Image (tube, rainbow, N blue to C red):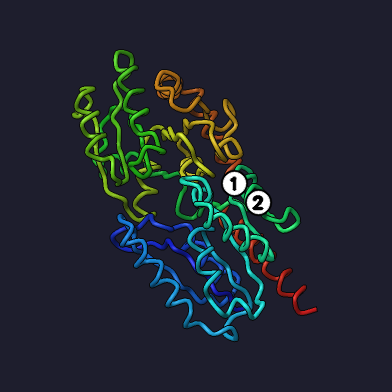
Amino acid sequence: MRVLVISSKYPSPEAPGYGVRVANHVRHMQEAHEIEVLLVASSKRPNTLRERAFKYSDLIARAALVRPGDFDLIHFHYATPSHAIATVLPWLRSRKPLVVTSHGGDLTTPPPSAPGRFLVEQMFRRAAAVIAVSGDVARACLEHRAKPEALHVIHMGCDLRVFRPRADREVLRGRLGITEAPTVLFVGDLIHTTGLDVLVEALHAVADRIAPSLVIVGSGALRSQYEALVNVRGLHERVRWLEPIRQPELAEWYAACDVVAFPARYEPFGSVTLEAMASGVPVVASGVGGVPEILESESNGLLVRPDDPKALGHALARVLTDRELSSRLRERALLDVVSHSQERQVARIVDLYEAIVTERAS
């Protein structure tokens, strides 16, 4: 089977986390399922309207060069800007089956404009299958007129070969320069939605009880604002800033830290929580979006209210001071994360491909 994959996000050396889970899926399809993938993707992260227009025009131009006879099925990642590409490309009239994966933010942050929404609805109606990365995203897809019978919830999954507990954890901590102080890890874009400011306020609130270090992995428009907040709260000597890094190196930071904080104000799925669980590190997360589909509070992690520094600080303090709780959360998470493996999720997508192509051929 030959599949044309079109994605507006794809990793590059400069932005290794940008669309990395799409890249992981493509690689696994090629390696484990012998699917030939024709890839049209963009690694450019636009910051202005002009850059965005250039990026999407380039993506459309390159996709237009692919002939309909070269593939059996089209798989778009991200409902927007895929809606524009699906509208203008003539080879879609060939009636090749279309699969669209909505990752959540493409429909919600911000929602499409009125013309954009119309195009998304047209694309969803045209699609043989719409994949939502969580039940929360599935509800957004239905609001955009996805056909219920064509809607499938398939999580992005986690590569358990990369994210795993490490027997050499103490050696890792030494190599990474982690001190004896308990260490909290934050991974995410430095934007309002991911809630780093909530985490900083939470650590400030519990500073009289615990004094953990904080490692921040990410980049974004609000970095200078968050650096100022760290300084105002007197935490600058305990905070370490890292630019986005490749997943093998990121996995080492997960395994070496004591707890992962995921204080998002909104999150369609929550891959960071899966990566933490697979790495054998307890996770404290906001109970928003698709996160409760992964985490069960007091079982395989702790869930807190979003935008509540006091609740987040209390939960982090519990994990860092209660070894029995930390161990119990970690052990259950390692069991539960197996059902979210990348292998299982990609296999479900491949099964869907085969069913669609077989039905079209009959």
Q: Nearer the viewer, residue 346 or 67?
A: 67
The percent position of residue 294, horizontal first and vertical second, equals 58, 39
- Amino acid type indicated by mark 2: Val
Location of mark 1 (residue): 137
The percent position of residue 99, horizontal first and vertical second, equals 62, 65
Q: Which mark is residue 359?
A: none
Q: Which mark is residue 153?
A: 2
**Marks 2,1: beta carbons within 8 A:** yes
In the picture shown, does residue 279 fall above or below 286? below
Give the residue furthest to the right. 362
SS for dot 2 = strand
Q: Nearer the viewer, residue 207 or 61?
A: 61
Side of 341 where 351 appears, left or right: right
Q: Nearer the viewer, residue 356 or 150?
A: 150
Mark 2 surroundings within 10 Å by alpha-carbon count, few (fewer than 14), some (14 through 19), many (20 or more): some
Instruction: Please identify the quadrant where the N terminus is shown.
Output: bottom right
Residue 321 visible in the picture: no
Residue 126 lies in quadrant: bottom right
Residue 254 visible in the picture: yes
Q: CA distance from mark 2 to mark 1?
A: 8 Å
- Amino acid type indicated by mark 1: Val
Give the residue furthest to the front. 114
Residue mark closest to the camera, 2 vs 1:
1
Side of 50 where 22 appears, left or right: right
